[in-house]
Amino acid sequence: MPGLDHILHGGFRAGRSYLVSGGPGAGKTTLGLHFLAEAEPGEALLISLGEARRTIGEDARGIGLDISDVVSIDLSPAESSGTADAYTLLEPWEAESPDLHARIHELFPDRPPKRVFVDALSQLRHLFPDSFQFRKQVMALMEYLKSGGVTVLYSAERGSSAEEDLQYLGDGILTLEATEFGRTLSVVKYRGSGFAEGKHSVRLSDHGMRVYERLIPTDHRRDFITESIASGVAEVDTLMGGGIERGTVTIFSGPTGVGKTSLGVQFMREAATRGERSVIFSFEERLETLRYRCQGIGIPLDDMIDQGTLAVREVEPLRYGPDEFAWLVRHEVETQGARIVMLDSLAGYRQSVFGQDVAPHVHALCRYLGNMGVTVLLVNEVGSIAGGELRVSEHGISYLADSVVLLRYIELDGELRKTIGMLKKRTGDFEKTLREFQITSQGLRVGEPMTGLRGILRGVPEATPPRTQAR
């Protein structure tokens, strides 16, 4: 699992032991199966104390993992229930506990295997009268395995009496959780090496477990040249003081249908003429709809996609958590070389955080992209069509923006018109006027600065009264 290996700064350290803790269904066994499946043939051992070996094998095949070469010791209740050794009339500790040392030596007489996964070691606690005896036996087993250079994973049920004892015996602790906001993995302890702190997203699927590291912007940086990026529409570039700068964040804010996405695609169209790759993460609009709209305004979306200068990724926000989505973005930037990234829209992205505050996740993503020299376009839809309070964003993220472009509807001479204006630009000067903005079959059209009017930002402009000359 590349994500987990990166969190552990390379993976598990050889010859150490690690506790995997979590509640039922959190993914403890799945993580252990990935660990075993990566071993060379004959170099892995599964000790099953919970589920039967045959059941675990079926589960592994169901997620595409081959553990057919993994040697096993099955001590599960299902395996022992039909044998003479089943403990039915005795207290568990009155029966002879399994000698795992001898069983392992019998299977591997020359040396123990390189990898061992004990699932679940907490079940062994029932075979001992007290925690002292339990810890004594587990410590002896771990010492035997680690002295042979074995890397050991062992699982325990979260909150069980055995978990507390096992926490002190391993070199590391990995905690798995399943919550209403999704599955997470966190590293509580990891001796001998650093690790990525915090909670990281986990997904269990037909392909096993995937771990998505929490995005830390300061861990990523790339040298780039700060330069202006033009839109290709002269009036827009004049309005914006030459365009927007590389490695900055720009918010296109306005009501529905005003042209925010079209303006963003126009910047990408101009970037394509320079051979640069852009990517749109569309949370709301399907590719077919976007293709149809771009065709209607003369933007060759299909040609850009075919030439590799544009990618459109449809994102179902309820399918991806913020960490998983950040990996999609990182793939486009670090593997595919994207130079412009557009999130369309912030309202759609907000659904992926499952009710949490969206600001920290947008902050991390934008700071990462800026550090990598990627220009970020954030499409933000405001609720009011015209009039009312002027708000850039309803998500508390306007502080992230290096530039803010306002697109508004106004009523003028009985007609509904669109306007465009620049509200903010940290990296230089810009035009402090509004211009009429049109989306035509020939592309975007921007008029001259609108003068002689007041109240434009309220959506209901009025003619400016003539000034009276002083006598």
Image (tube, rainbow, N blue to C red):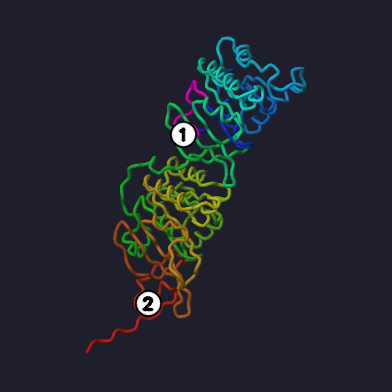
Q: Nearer the viewer, mark 2 or mark 1?
A: 1
Q: Residue placed farthest to the top in the image? A: 110
Residue 189 percent across, percent down from the top left = 48, 31
Above or below, comparing residue 455 to residue 227 in the picture: below
Residue 275 makes an appearance in the image = no
Above or below, comparing residue 461 to residue 294 in the picture: below
Whether residue 120 is in magenta: the answer is no
Secondary element at image label 2: strand
Q: What is the magenta range?
A: 2-17
Secondary element at image label 1: helix
Residue 187 makes an appearance in the image = yes
Q: How crowded is the residue under tag 1: few (<14 C-alpha within 10 Å), some, or many (20+)?
A: some
Above or below, comparing residue 79 to residue 419 in the picture: above
Label 2, label 1: how far apart the Cα atoms are: 56 Å
Q: Residue at x 46, y 76 (%)?
A: 411
Q: Residue at x 49, y 53 (%)?
A: 357
Whether residue 11 is in magenta: the answer is yes
In the picture, the disc for residue 270 is none
In the picture, the disc for residue 454 is 2
State the residue position of label 1: 6
Where residue 108 sits, quadrant-wise, is top right
